[in-house]
């Protein structure tokens, strides 16, 4: 039996608005622990991530799924931390070139659970089979609900596309079901 590693990377720099990342991670972990196929998944976590921590964590854990939760800023990139805990941007081209390498090492899916991360998702999808980004802002509750349903589906043996649709279905009531987008490698 092949165990899939999910690497959850989180960053919420001091000079950005506070997100409920701890709640998101707790809910994902709980869902995976109770899932039918729980023995097929291992969840690893990296917090207060800086640029070098991002690639080091992927090197260390060799995940099949990389989940980023934090802030996104459209063309400027996703927001990580610098050495002092302040915001620093990682742009789409940098992420794309990094994931080009990690695609060869087994990364199959990337979920960018961050506002305005569609630009990065599009760039990464040149190399990774499935990439999920957000077209606009996404509220904490919607981000959490989407993630929980996504991993609940994966944990019960469903494929990424089904998991994505289930995640979207769980945020219809919040009027944010069109925010997540699934990009597939061309």
Image (cartoon, rainbow, N blue to C red):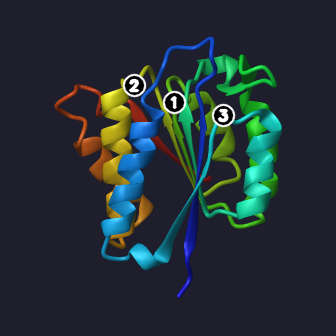
Q: Secondary structure under badge 2? A: loop
Q: Is residue 65 left or right of residue 152?
A: right
Confirm or deny contact between disc 2 and disc 1 (CB under 8 A): yes
Q: How many marks?
A: 3
Residue 151: percent from left, percent from top:
39, 57
* Horizontal side of residue 95 vs 117, given as left or right: right
Q: List the residue tagged with mark 1.
A: 114
Camera-side residue of 183 and 11: 11
Residue 185 picture location, percent across and down: 61, 53
**Percent position of residue 152, x then y:** 32, 60
C-alpha separation, residue under disc 3 versus residue under disc 1: 15 Å
Q: Is residue 55 above or below residue 13?
A: below
Examine the image and state in which quarter residue 156 appears.
Answer: bottom left
Q: Residue at x 79, y 58 (%)?
A: 59
**Secondary structure under badge 3?**
loop
Q: Which mark is residue 48?
A: 3
Q: CA distance from mark 2 to mark 3?
A: 20 Å
Q: Which residue is mark 2?
A: 138
Q: Earlier in the sequence, mark 3 or mark 1?
A: 3
The residue at 61%/29% (across/down) is 119
Which one is in front in this view, the residue at disc 3 or the one at disc 1?
Answer: 3
Q: Is residue 178 visible?
A: no
Determine crowd level at label 2: few under 14, some 14-19, many 20+ residues with C-alpha closer than 10 A. Answer: many
Mark 2 and mark 3 in contact? Answer it, CB < 8 Å.
no
């Amino acid at each position: 039996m092949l165990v899939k590693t999910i690497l959850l990377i989180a960053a919420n720099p001091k000079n950005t608005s506070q997100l409920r990342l701890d709640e998101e991670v707790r809910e994902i972990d709980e869902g995976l622990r109770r899932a039918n196929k729980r023995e097929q998944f291992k969840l690893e976590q990296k917090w207060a991530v800086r640029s070098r921590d991002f690639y080091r964590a992927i090197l260390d854990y060799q995940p099949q799924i990389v989940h980023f939760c934090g802030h996104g800023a459209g063309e400027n990139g996703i927001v990580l931390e610098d050495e002092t805990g302040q915001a620093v941007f990682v742009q789409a081209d940098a992420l794309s070139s990094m994931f080009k390498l990690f695609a060869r090492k087994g990364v199959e899916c990337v979920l960018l659970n961050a506002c305005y991360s569609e630009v990065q998702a599009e760039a990464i999808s040149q190399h990774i089979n499935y990439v999920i980004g957000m077209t606009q802002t996404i509220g904490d509750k919607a981000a959490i609900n989407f993630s929980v349903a996504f991993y609940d589906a994966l944990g019960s043996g469903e494929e990424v596309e089904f998991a994505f649709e289930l995640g979207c279905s769980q945020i219809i009531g919040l009027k944010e079901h069109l925010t997540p987008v699934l990009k597939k490698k061309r």
